[in-house]
Amino acid sequence: MIGRVGFRTVVLVLLLAVQASGCGYALAGRGNALPATIRVIGVPDFQNLSPYPDIDRYMTESVREEFQARGRYRILAQADGVDGRFVGTLVSVEFRPATFTADNQVARNTMVVTAAVEFREVATDKVIWSNPHYQLREDYQLQGVAGDPAANLLRDRDAQLRIARAFARSVVTSVFEAF
C-alpha cells in the first residue's frame, strides 16, 4: 500500500507527465507557424544577382514544389491575389575548397549559396519570416574541368537541381517553423 507521501508523489509525477505531453514540441520539419488564414501562397520568380543564369529558376521551382509538398496550400507563381507571399533574391554563389587530392589539387568544393528571402502575410502586410542573408552550404564534387567549379556548375544541371532542392527544403522548413 502506498503511503500518503508516496501517493502525493505518484499524483505529482502523473500531473507533470500529462502537462509535458502537451508542451508544443514537434519533430523538426513538421511544425507550422503560419496563420490559418494563409491558404494560397505566391512564389514569384526569384531575382538573380549571381553570375549563374539558371540556378534561380531551379530554386524558384524547387521552393514552389516544397511548399506544395506540405499539402494544404495552393501555390501560385505570382505575387498578387494570394494570402502569403514568398519572395527570394539569389545574392551570390561562391565556391570554397573543401578537400584536396594527394597532389594538392581541389577535389571537392563547398558551394555557399546566399539569398535574401521573406515570407509575408499579404492581408496584414506582416512579415512572418525573413532572412536577408540566408545561406546554404553544399559540397560539390568537381567534374570535368579540374580547378574550375564555376564552369563545371554551369554545365552540371543535376548539381544545380540538387542544390536548389536542398535550398528549398531548408528555407521552407525555416518558414514553417519560424526559425
Image (spheres, rainbow, N blue to C red):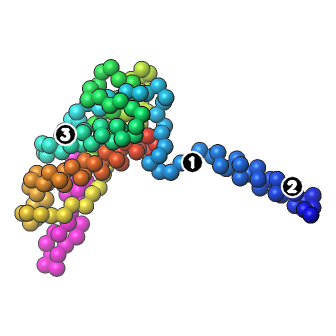
Q: Is residue 52 magenta?
A: no
Q: Can residue 101 be seen at all in this image of the molecule?
A: yes
Q: Which numbered marker is on residue 25?
A: 1
Q: Is residue 59 left or right of residue 172?
A: left
Q: Quadrant of residue 76?
A: top left
CA distance for labels 1 and 2: 27 Å
Q: Quadrant of residue 179?
A: top left
Q: Residue at x 36, y 48 (%)?
A: 170
Q: Which residue range is magenta in the image?
A: 92-112
Q: Nearer the viewer, residue 37 or 55?
A: 37
Return the x and y of residue 66 as percentages of the image width and height: 33, 42
Q: Residue at x 41, y 27 (%)?
A: 39
In this picture, is 90 found above or below 105?
Answer: above
Q: Which numbered marker is on residue 57?
A: 3
Q: Residue at x 19, y 50 (%)?
A: 160
For marks 3 and 2 on the same chain, the one whose residue lies earlier in the sequence? 2
